[in-house]
């Protein structure tokens, strides 16, 4: 595998090797920097959990920092701090990532520490008990943030009581109920070489990275000798979410909170990450609610002063996605704001974008992609996701060309398919009855 930088330079080079056991190593050489971003990506997310394991993936992410046979929790953090390195992790719906950024000379150390955490964690019962309170505090923190709460409520409304609809963190009930054995079972089943991808970008040599990874994983590779990498989950490979289009959830969900602002998300099911129309939806989304010049920002904030924050968003999964509008406004203005948002969506469905909006939307999406690849961490992330959840690594030049090729007909077609779907509305604020919001969905 090889590739070029988005600016056409042939210097950055992408290479891939598959080690015994199906462990993949993908790197991009960036000779102009003095650092390296490293990520270990695991093909497991919260959508892989049944009810008995709800929240286990994120819980496990916490526990992998608590110690291995080689290092205590303090030694893990102190080792990275001693070289000025950055280290963290995150859990998503379909994958988990452990990452670090270090000086190029310290890459061997980063590979050793992260690999040790991922395959050698002890998952001690005392650590499970101690970290349970930390996870519960994180849940409480999210619940105290109405912005987080309204997005969780919207996702649950669209996808229902399914792994996609449930919160990544789990619930207070599921975290209190889960046991060390259940978490360890999740760890043993999912953290195996065929489901792992090591991606790195920066001032590095691919062959050296492969040697370091092979040494760090050692016996774990032998246990899976002959295994092949797990294939990415794609909609075409069997259909993971069965609620496409009108079958997805719609209606109003209300979370009553004694707060000063109404937090609103209005939207519907979107597109999968490999859908051909994703480029048109990206351009449409940018023009409708992606910046200060967007229709929603101009109509809701600039012209009427009804809200401080208003934007639209699109997110993708293997087989489905979300599209929506978020607004934070005074409770007394909620009906007016929702009416304006619904009217602007209807205008786009009926008439599409103007020439100026189409070009501005394209420019915004193109610029965001290229500017997002200006540092090793973003390039490392691109490599990891491309290998784990996409069919292949799309050359940036081809992505830019696909965005530039979006036409008015493409925008109108995706608006008719996605934005015209039945809507779900999530509301967090000082309201007692959801019935009054039903009109916003018609």
Image: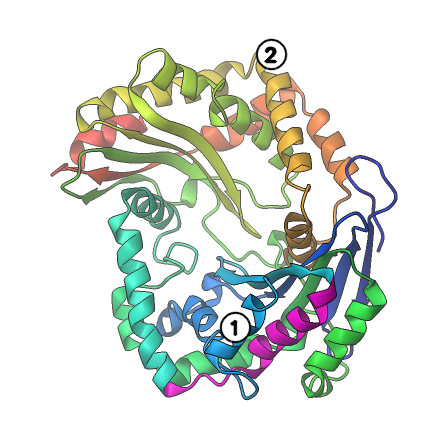
Whole-percent x and y of residue 343?
37, 17
Whole-percent x and y of residue 52?
36, 74
Asked if residue 114 lies in the magenta stretch, the reply is yes
Q: Residue furthest right?
A: 10
Residue in front for this viewpoint, 28 or 423: 28
Q: Residue at x 64, y 45 (%)?
A: 274
Q: Quadrant of the N terminus?
A: bottom right
The image quarter containing residue 344 is top left
Residue in front for this viewpoint, 381 or 296: 381
Q: Residue at x 34, y 40 (%)?
A: 250
The magenta segment is: 105-125
Real-space Cα distance between discs 1 and 2? Answer: 53 Å
Q: Indicate the secondary structure of the residue bearing disc 2.
A: helix
Q: Is residue 59 above or below residue 405?
A: below
Q: Is residue 56 above or below residue 382?
A: below
Q: Which mark is residue 428?
A: none
Asked if residue 157 lies in the magenta stretch, the reply is no
Q: Is residue 212 above or below residue 202?
A: below
User: If you read the primary sequence from the N terminus, does the residue marked by circle 1 or circle 2 appear first?
Assistant: 1
Q: Is residue 277 visible?
A: no
Neighbourhood count class around disc 2 (C-alpha, 10 Å): few under 14, some 14–19, many 20 upward: few
Q: Is residue 441 left or right of residue 103?
A: left
Residue with the mark numbered 1: 78
Neighbourhood count class around disc 1 (C-alpha, 10 Å): few under 14, some 14–19, many 20 upward: few
Q: Are marks 1 and 2 in contact (CB under 8 Å)?
A: no
Q: Which mark is residue 356?
A: 2
Q: Is residue 376 above or below residue 176?
A: above
Q: Quadrant of the C terminus?
A: top left
Which of the two marks, 1 or 2, is nearer to us in this view? 1
Whole-percent x and y of residue 303?
36, 11
Q: Residue furthest left?
A: 432
């Amino acid at each position: 595998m090889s590739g070029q930088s988005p600016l056409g330079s042939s210097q950055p080079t992408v290479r891939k090797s598959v080690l015994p056991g199906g462990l993949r190593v993908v790197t991009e050489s960036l000779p102009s920097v003095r650092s390296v971003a490293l990520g270990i990506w695991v093909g497991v997310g919260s959508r892989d959990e049944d009810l008995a394991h709800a929240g286990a993936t994120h819980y496990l992410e916490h526990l992998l920092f608590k110690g291995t046979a080689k290092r205590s929790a303090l030694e893990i953090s102190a080792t990275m701090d001693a070289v000025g390195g950055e280290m963290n992790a995150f859990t998503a719906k379909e994958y988990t990532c452990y990452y670090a950024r270090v000086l190029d000379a310290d890459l061997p150390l980063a590979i050793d520490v992260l690999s040790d955490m991922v395959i050698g964690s002890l998952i001690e019962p005392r650590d499970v008990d101690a970290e349970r309170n930390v996870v519960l505090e994180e849940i409480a923190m999210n619940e105290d943030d109405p912005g987080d709460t309204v997005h969780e409520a919207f996702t649950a409304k669209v996808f229902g009581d399914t792994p996609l609809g449930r919160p990544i963190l789990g619930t207070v009930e599921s975290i209190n109920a889960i046991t060390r054995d259940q978490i360890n079972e999740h760890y043993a089943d999912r953290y195996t070489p065929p489901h792992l991808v090591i991606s790195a970008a920066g001032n590095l040599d691919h062959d050296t990275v492969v040697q370091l990874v092979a040494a760090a994983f050692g016996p774990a590779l032998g246990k899976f000798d002959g295994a092949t990498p797990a294939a990415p989950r794609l909609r075409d490979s069997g259909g993971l979410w069965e609620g496409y289009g009108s079958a997805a959830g719609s209606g109003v969900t209300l979370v009553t909170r004694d707060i000063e602002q109404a937090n609103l998300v209005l939207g519907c099911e979107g597109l999968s990450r490999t859908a051909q129309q994703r480029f048109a939806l990206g351009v449409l989304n940018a023009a409708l609610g992606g910046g200060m010049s967007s229709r929603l920002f101009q109509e809701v904030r600039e012209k009427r002063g009804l809200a401080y924050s208003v934007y639209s968003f699109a997110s993708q999964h293997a087989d489905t996605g979300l599209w929506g509008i978020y607004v934070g406004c005074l409770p007394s203005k909620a009906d007016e704001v929702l009416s304006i948002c619904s009217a602007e969506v209807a205008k786009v469905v009926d008439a599409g974008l103007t020439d100026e909006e189409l070009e501005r939307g394209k420019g915004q999406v193109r610029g965001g992609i290229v500017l997002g690849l200006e540092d090793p961490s973003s390039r490392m992330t691109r490599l990891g996701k491309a290998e784990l959840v996409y069919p292949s690594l799309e050359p940036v030049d081809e992505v830019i060309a696909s965005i530039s090729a979006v036409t008015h007909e493409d925008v109108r077609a995706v608006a008719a398919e996605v934005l015209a779907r039945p809507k779900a509305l999530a509301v967090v604020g000082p309201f007692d009855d959801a019935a009054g919001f039903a009109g916003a969905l018609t």
